[in-house]
Image (cartoon, rainbow, N blue to C red):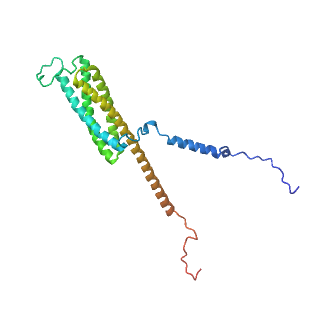
Amino acid sequence: MYGRKTPTTYRSTPSVYSHYTGKSTSNLRSSKSLKSLRVPWYQKPILHDAYVLDLQRGSLLTGFISLFIALFTFAQSVFDLYCLGMASPGAVHYGYYVLSFQFVYVGSPAVRNVLVVFSLFSWIGSVAVIVTSIILIMALRKEYEKRIVPWLYSFGVFILFRFVAFIFASIVNDMIFAYNIIMCLFWVVFCIIGVYGWILVYSLYLELADLTKLEDLAHLRMGTMASLNASLAGSRPTTPHSTVSTMPASQI
């Protein structure tokens, strides 16, 4: 009777934390980490290497090509505006022996005004691309990814606008003249090279941005560890074993 324990009727309530096992918490953490590591599709590099050159040299070559395209567009827009002005219906002028304006569109006034607007905005866009292409070349040599952004916007809008403009001009102009045929073929090549070059520069920009983020994260961790070590060294408690007694030996 004395050596036997009586059974207790008290039942302890289960702990709230007993329902959460280590497996569920690990799955929760892993799911959160996977969600944080997911990169949006527009932030993934489209190309990792050029076919002939590497990504950095291909992007630098694209900068020079875009500068050439912008200079070419500047000259072409000025020439087109001059031809459209000289060949306007009812205009009286001389000098046909130097240049024949038979290739210039002289049909519907609405279509002619659209061609004038395309030439005018192409001229304005070429000036913007000239400036941003110079900035791009300087930024690629020093790997400043933030200075690449203006070129990405300006050249992307410019090449799309020029694609629509040359498609419209190829439809309304007579393709029996050499000037119209040559300009159409040139802009087919320019659009293909421009789109491919824009993808190259955008892929390089994403890689440089990722490297910058990793460098900033490494600097942040190093700074945090340095401040943590300094705080631990400054706030270390003293114990009787670590202190040195200054009392005379005769009084001990």
Q: How many marks?
A: 0
Q: Position of residue 59 (x, y in %)?
A: 34, 41
| Whether residue 174 is situated above or below residue 68 in the rendered picture | above
Residue located farthest toward the right when viewing the structure as drawn: 1
| Whether residue 9 is situated above or below residue 197 in the rendered picture | below
Residue 165: quarter of image: top left
Front residue of 194/87: it is: 194
Residue 147 visible in image: no
Residue 156: quarter of image: top left
Q: As drawn, is 199 to the left or to the right of 27? A: left
Determine the residue positioned at 45% across, 52% down: 218
| Whether residue 172 is situated above or below residue 205 in the rendered picture | above
Determine the residue positioned at 25% across, 27% down: 183
Residue 176 visible in image: yes
Front residue of 213/70: it is: 70
Q: Position of residue 142 (x, y in %)?
A: 32, 48
Residue 87: quarter of image: top left
Q: Position of residue 203 (x, y in %)?
A: 39, 40
Determine the residue positioned at 29% across, 20% down: 171
Residue located farthest toward the front when viewing the structure as drawn: 52
Front residue of 128/68: it is: 68
| Whether residue 167 is situated above or below residue 247 in the rendered picture | above
Q: As drawn, is 106 to the left or to the right of 240? A: left
Q: Position of residue 161 (x, y in %)?
A: 31, 29
Quarter holding the N terminus is bottom right
Quarter holding the C terminus is bottom right
